[in-house]
Image (cartoon, rainbow, N blue to C red):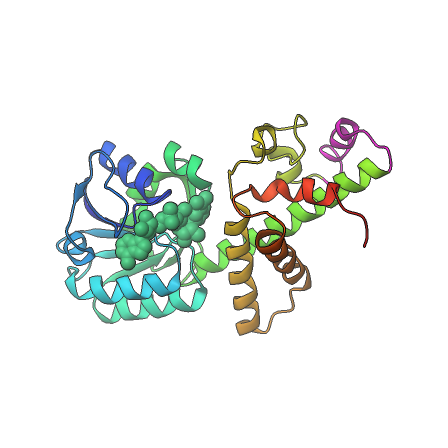
Amino acid sequence: MKVGFIGLGNMGAPMAANLAKAGHEVTGFDVAAPCPEGVTPAASAAEAAAGREVVITMLPNGEILRAVADEIIPAMNKGAVFLDCSTVDVESARAVAEQAEAAGLLPLDAPVSGGVGGAQAGTLTFMAGGSEEAFAKAAPLFEVMGQKAVHCGPSGNGQAAKICNNMILGVTMIATCEAFALADKLGLDRQKMYDVVSTSSGYSWVMNAYTPAPGIGASSPADNGYKPGFAAELMLKDLRLAQQAAEAADADTPMGQAAAELYERFVEHEGGRGMDFSAMLPRFEKRGRG
Ligand code: NAD
């Protein structure tokens, strides 16, 4: 397929490189980052998008997505797929989809889970919102860049699935870390705590597959000095998007709100920026109730 790829950062570069490696003809554009091997550089976003069957965006936020959409939608062929894989607010995703549809394009919001490791290995999970037709056309690309793609419904539903998932993840990470820190203070050995919880009703992906305690359970960023992985500031971004969506939809999300506030404190005032989001454990470890 002829693919345009806009946003070649930590995630976009390896995704674009995998598409090129699989034999797709990929043209790329980024305001700062270089094109990875196999991807032909374009002089602008519009040039990367013109004449392509699918145009993929992998950008930092909804504001930038809206600006790039204004630029590329008029340049794209009618019937082409506008596949946005960035994590953005539901409102921006739906506004961009509406604009693309009005121009005769097939929009699909398809944020990912799996991080930089998943992008490099081609094992991302895509959660997609848009028409059946758009999803079917993008499916061969999902197969190269990921191992699973779920069609979640109409435009915006991919972003909805992403922020709901990550709200659970943020809350669960905090709960698991505060429980480890409590166990420490109660004199319960961390390995014993893991042995019990990982096979009891407190188990979770965090405990079993991303254990936040160094040297215990699954190998994870905790075993590498809490180098990300999934950075605390990215978790904060997703928790803020969840709260923004909850406010717009009048949904009561007290645990999500508490998690957003805690990650905000951690990232902005407690040295959490640049650390993996599981570094909540050393944060709790050092504190008392005060
Ligand atoms: P990044 O900052 O490394 O990459 C974003 C790229 O977009 C940068 O290279 C930047 O120069 C480029 N860019 C900015 N404005 C542009 C414009 N107007 N035109 C063209 N390029 C532009 O970020 P990332 O880690 O690759 O994340 C990308 C998206 O994926 C974000 O929405 C993020 O929330 C989401 N995401 C990231 C991860 C992760 O672990 N990094 C995991 C899941 C989802």
Name the residue at the right extreme.
186
Asked if the magenta segment contains residue 196, the reply would be yes
Give the answer, above or below, for where 247 lies relative to 36. Answer: below
Number of callouts:
0
Res 246 seen here: yes
Residue 222 relative to residue 86: left or right: right
Occupied quadrant, residue 201: top right
Q: Is residue 128 above or below residue 12?
A: below
Q: Quadrant of the N terminus?
A: top left
Estimate the x, y position of residue 99 in percent, counting from the top left: 28, 70
**Residue occupying the point 45% across, 60% down:** 157
User: Which quadrant is the C terminus positioned in?
Assistant: bottom right
* 60 in relation to 193, above or below: below
Please indicate whether residue 283 sits to the left or right of residue 159 in the image.
right
Q: Which quadrant of the structure image shows residue 281? A: top right
Identify the residue at image location x=61%, y=70%. 251
Q: Is residue 279 left or right of residue 26?
A: right
Res. 127 in view: no
Q: Position of residue 152 (x, y in %)?
A: 45, 56
Foreground residue, 92 or 158?
Answer: 92
Residue at the image point whose x is 24% and y is 53% from the top: 55
Locate residue 35, reporting x and y percent. 23, 41
Query: Up-down: is 148 above or below 64?
Result: above
Query: Which range of residues does the magenta coloring cover?
Result: 186-202
- Point out residue 193 in the picture as x, y percentages from the top left corner: 78, 32
Q: Is 199 in the magenta?
A: yes
